[in-house]
Image (cartoon, rainbow, N blue to C red):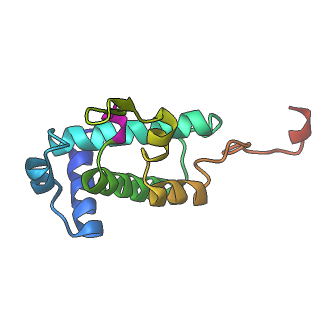
């Protein structure tokens, strides 16, 4: 994501959530990074999740609806991390009880349920055939 795209995403975040992302980054202890870095990291994490769940989705050729859905899911994921925490950085070790939380439990909490729903509804987490342009001989391929 370029700097101008990140600035555009920051404005969309503000319109969507009513929060100033730059302000949130300076006051949030967990996400000690710039807004630009936070947007890029969150975008990369969401794209990697799409690639792992739906490897046939071509992220370079999304429809306009899918692009909008991805932006909305990105904003929802950013809100989730700001408010709940970044579970990708948590090892699961509890100092008080000297025990480990199951990594599957942490993984379940990594992604915003709303972001996942948006991605599913737009077809971005569908692992079947997507973005394939059929012709009259589609069945031969």
In this view of the protein, which residue sits in the foreground, 34 or 89? 89
Residue 12 point in image, percent of width and height: 27, 61
Residue 49 point in image, percent of width and height: 50, 38
In the shown orientation, is residue 5 left or right of residue 107? Answer: left
- What secondary structure do most residues of the magenta stretch adopt? helix
In the shown orientation, is residue 117 left or right of residue 115? Answer: right
Q: Is residue 79 magenta?
A: no
Q: Residue at x 54, y 43 (%)?
A: 61
Residue 109 point in image, percent of width and height: 44, 47
Say if 24 sits above or below 48 in the image.
below
Q: Residue at x 44, y 48 (%)?
A: 111
**Magenta region, residue range:** 87-91
Regarding residue 59, the answer to whether it shows in the image is no
Q: Quadrant of the C terminus?
A: top right
Q: Residue at x 14, y 41 (%)?
A: 34
In the shown orientation, is residue 113 left or right of residue 121? Answer: left
Q: Quadrant of the N terminus?
A: top left
In the shown orientation, is residue 122 left or right of residue 35? Answer: right
């Amino acid at each position: 994501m370029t700097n101008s795209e990140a600035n555009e995403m920051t404005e969309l975040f503000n319109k969507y959530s009513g929060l100033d992302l730059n302000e949130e980054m300076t006051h949030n202890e967990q996400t000690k990074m710039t807004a630009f870095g936070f947007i890029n990291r969150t975008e990369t994490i969401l794209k990697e999740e799409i690639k792992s769940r739906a490897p046939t989705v071509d992220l370079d050729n999304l429809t306009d609806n899918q692009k909008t859905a991805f932006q909305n899911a990105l904003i929802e994921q950013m809100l989730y991390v700001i408010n709940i925490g970044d579970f990708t950085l948590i090892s699961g070790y509890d100092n008080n009880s000297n025990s480990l939380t199951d990594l599957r439990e942490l993984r379940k909490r990594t992604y915003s349920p709303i972001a996942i729903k948006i991605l599913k509804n737009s077809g971005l987490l569908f692992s079947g055939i997507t973005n394939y342009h059929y012709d009259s001989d589609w069945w031969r391929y």
